[in-house]
Image (tube, rainbow, N blue to C red):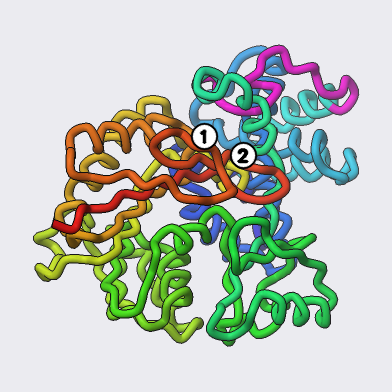
Amino acid sequence: MAQPLRAVAAEVLLAVEQGQSLSQCLPPALARLPGTDRPTLQALCYGSCRWFHRLDDELHSRLKRPLRPGDRVIHHLMLVALFQLRFSQQASYAVLNETVEACRALGKPHLTGLVNGVLRAAERQGAPTPNTDASRYSHPDWMVEKLRHNWPDDWSAILEANNAQAPMTLRVNARRFTRTEYLAQLAEAGIAASPTRFAPHGIQLEQPVPVDQLPWFADGAVSVQDEAAQLCTTLLDLAPGQRVLDACAAPGGKTCAILEACPELAEVVAIDEAAARLPRVEENLERLDLSATLHQADAGDLDQWWDGQAFDRILLDVPCSATGVIRRHPDIKLLRRESDILPLAGIQLGLLDTLWSILKPGGRLVYATCSVFPQENHRIIQRFCKQQGAAVLRAPDVAWGRDMGAGRQLLPDPTSHDGFFYAVLEKPDS
């Protein structure tokens, strides 16, 4: 007999609390359920992570004492139930009854009385008024304070954007269709959509749809990619015959965008350290009928992969805190720690130093993050330019983002793009 849906959701939440991302622990959980239950499980897990800090505050206030470590999964089971009571249209009686059954299925029948009592009180009394910003916006304290410090005029808008549903955005494969042509294809299929403001090949859907409903998706007509991520090709200044490096490339969206933007490139080399992520790059390339040289390696360890031939263009999308894409990955709120930022900044500066050495004179390097923290963004570029006197910082002539003096920052916009940072560096031709 299949395990109840809420029991599976509780186990996924517990795995996230123990350090696994949703992208790691959710797919095997989905595979355990019939296809009809999978969208519900995904919604429960994403929603419970999105509102975890607010729900956890409420649950703590309702428990006389914390559950024993061995019963922690029941804490998460009650969080899933609270998410449904506060944020879903599910009938309350069904949430209560099915959560008690899930408690039994998890092998904790002795806690059914507690679960029932806590949830009945929560239903009867309604949601408490959040008494801190961390609870109100459902983010960890350190993140709220860091955003308030870094973005005194924007911190609350960033937090609200992080809790919004991200739109579904497409990148039209310019080798197959113009954007206008593909918008007509969508209209014919009854899918409402509009052009993105800044990305030249971007289309934003009014409502998300399964990719198999998108016209010609399997034949490589479009890819799903946020508008901010698409902007990398507009900054690289691509031209026929160039050799291009996409460092930290998985899952391959930017690699494919580069190849679509300039099919006459001499070669695109794509690197990622995680072997498990490279098959996604291969799948995307195959679907789009594109070709790149792939390496599973640490981009910063040139001995692992570099053939001695310098690059005309380098896209360095560095490992970062991913605080600009929380709306798509709400588990970041549980996984990220303030203590992560300094080591990440060291990795970012190290990668920049190393890859700069294999950029041709006259070449261009585009530095990118999906972070909103200056410590990973314009301050890294300032530090690099200070120690690397020859680097020329280019201010792109664009209508998007905020000029930070050393690069441009996009903050997450609930109606369009994610949070992203870009800087353009050139090596003098001498």
Q: Is residue 161 visible?
A: yes
Whether residue 28 is situated above or below residue 108 in the rendered picture: below
Tell me the distance, in whole angstroms, between the alpha carbons under discs 2 and 1: 7 Å
Looking at this view, name the residue that lies furthest to the front: 430
Question: Which quadrant would residue 87 be assigned to in this image?
Answer: top right
For the N terminus, give its image quadrant. Answer: bottom right
Q: In this image, 129 relative to 13: left or right?
A: right
Question: Which quadrant would residue 429 be assigned to in this image?
Answer: bottom left
Residue 90 disc label: none
Three-letter code, disc 2: Cys
Q: Residue at x 66, y 39 (%)?
A: 48
Residue 49 disc label: 2
Q: Is residue 399 magenta?
A: no
Q: Which residue is mark 1?
A: 334
Residue 17 location in percent, x, y?
50, 36
Three-letter code, disc 1: Leu
For the C terminus, give its image quadrant. Answer: bottom left
Mark 2 vs 1: CB contact within 8 A: yes
Query: Element type at marker 2?
Result: helix
Q: Which residues are magenta?
A: 123-142
Whether residue 40 is situated above or below residue 400 in the rendered picture: below
